[in-house]
Image (cartoon, rainbow, N blue to C red):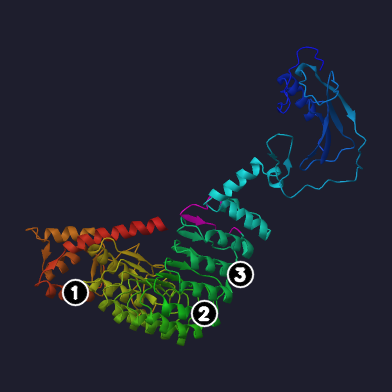
Amino acid sequence: MNLTGGEEVVEEGQAKEPPALDPAIEAQAQLLLSSVPEETDVDMEIDNGLGSRTDTRLSLGRVPSQMSRATMVRTPAARPTTQGKEIHEMVDEENILITELKQSEYRLEESEEVEASKEPDILVLEDKVPVTARTDEDEYDTDLEVEEDSEDLHDTSGRSNYRKICAQFGVVPISYFVRHIMDQELVMRYHGLGPVAAKAMALVLRDNVTLEKLNLDGNWIEGPGGEAMARMLEENDYISEVCLSDNRLGTTGARSLCKMLGVNTGLRKIDLSDNAFEDGDVEYFVEMLENNKYLKSLDLSRNRFGEQAGELLGPAIASNDILDTLDLSWNHLRQKGAVSVARGLKENVRLKRCSLAWNGFGPEGGTAIADALVTNNSLHEIDISGNRLNADVATKVAKAIAVNDNIRVLRMGNNLLTTIGAIDLARSINETESSEMEELDLTDVPVEFEFLRICEDIKMKRPNFKVTHGPILRSGNTMEDLGKPAIDPFKRKDPVMVLQDHIVVNDMRLLDILKRHDPDETLQVTPEQFMAALDELAVPYDKPKVNEAIERIAKEQNGRIYFGDFIKQFEQANDVVKEGNEVT
């Protein structure tokens, strides 16, 4: 065996380890390999350092197609020859050369595509550790997608879900709703939602736990939208107040919402006014009122309930012992329907506030209301304005509130009560010592000066008492007032005015004269001294009428006339004149 020097002799039978590459040369080789396009199959000739070549076939993963490819040929600078027996010789690492990158004869057509394997491919080299190639899922796993999935996963507000639902329904997301979706109160009046947008909102609000008050007034969500809201409220018990007025819910909405009210345990107040409910829809509300266990306030005003609906609502109102507030104003509850509702109110033991305004009750329905007020001790506020009530009904109501001291607010404006009816109501409040009346509303009902005097007496007893009335007349507007002298409350000329229960002093000079007849300053004079003071004033007056009134008052006050009340009345009358001048 001829040795040239520097070689290492290995005994037979001993395995020789392959030579290690120089790091610089290996880095250069890797750089060249990285610049070569990858193919599905690559044929490489690798010298094993023992004078023979090994064909290695690489199976790679998904690679793009190329017009041509190159292969790397790695050969030693000197190749020893073997004679006789096989000798394993070590090739010096410095003599290994990367000779060339040559053109391959293998070509692919431009239209040919290489299909990627569905299973991970294994890159296998001689005596190397297997390397796992990336799958298709790894190829498309980007940071952007990770952020989006993470946002959807952690978004508890429902904003991202709402956007997806809107995209699915083909509607534009409402930015106001997105901004306020986590508020405790959401007010979206007249946003023009329509049925589809309402459905999208309902699907998101189903899982909302922060919203307590929802107002969708005037959005015309119609029956389908109302049905979607009803399904949402069947699952969401956190919302306590809902307003769906002016939405044209119709029969579909009425049926769905009444069904919801039978299972929802969190809703306390609902406004369903102005939704075109008719007599045929009232059966749903009747069933709901009879089975209601949680709802406290119900507004069904401005719908189309007529006489037939009123007949059915009456017994339902009587049987309900949960509602505190009921509004049936601006419907058509007349004749038998009005009487039925009034009877239901009579038997109800829970209602605190009830509005029956603008239904056209008429005298028959008004009489039934007066009868109900006699026995109902739970009602605090009632509104029967605009129901074509007359003076007889006002007198009956006055008798009812004389025995019912729980009524605090009575509204009877826009009725034909006349001045007599207004006076009867005011007198009943004034004479009932236990009355807790706080407000009397007689809007557009004409009154006269005696009504004002009675109201002043009420205010002296209850300073917080509030009264609203129509124009002030010089005299009454009934048949009984024919021939009665007119009294101008703003321009008084008579020194005294004799009313049914009062004598009003209009001239301060009379009070000065009465003081001269009272040297002891007791503010009391005899009837004779009072008449003498009037004569001394030298002003025309109705002497017989005044004398009769003086005698009557003297009997009530042990034969004396206390004129201290006249001073207070004069001061109060001046206040009324000032208020009248400010109005004019």
Give the class, few, some or many, for how many residues have Cα within 10 Å of label 1's Cα (few <14, many ≥20).
Answer: some
- Pointer 1 or 3: first along the chain: 3
* Residue type at numbered disc 3: Pro
Report the magenta residues as a range.
178-191
Residue in the foreground of this view, choosing between 525 and 330: 330
- Pointer 3 or 2: first along the chain: 3
* Quarter of the figure that contains the C terminus: bottom left
Give the class, few, some or many, for how many residues have Cα within 10 Å of label 3's Cα (few <14, many ≥20).
Answer: some
Residue at 87% from the left image edge and 31% from the top image edge: 70
> Residue 305's mark?
2
Q: Position of residue 130 (x, y in %)?
A: 69, 38
* Residue type at numbered disc 2: Phe
**Which quadrant of the figure has residue 457?**
bottom left
Q: Mark 1 highlights which residue?
A: 547
Is disc 1 placed on a helix, strand or loop?
helix
Q: Position of residue 107 (x, y in %)?
A: 92, 39
Between marks 3 and 2 in the image, the one whose residue lies nearer the viewer:
3
- The CA distance from mark 1 to mark 3 is 77 Å
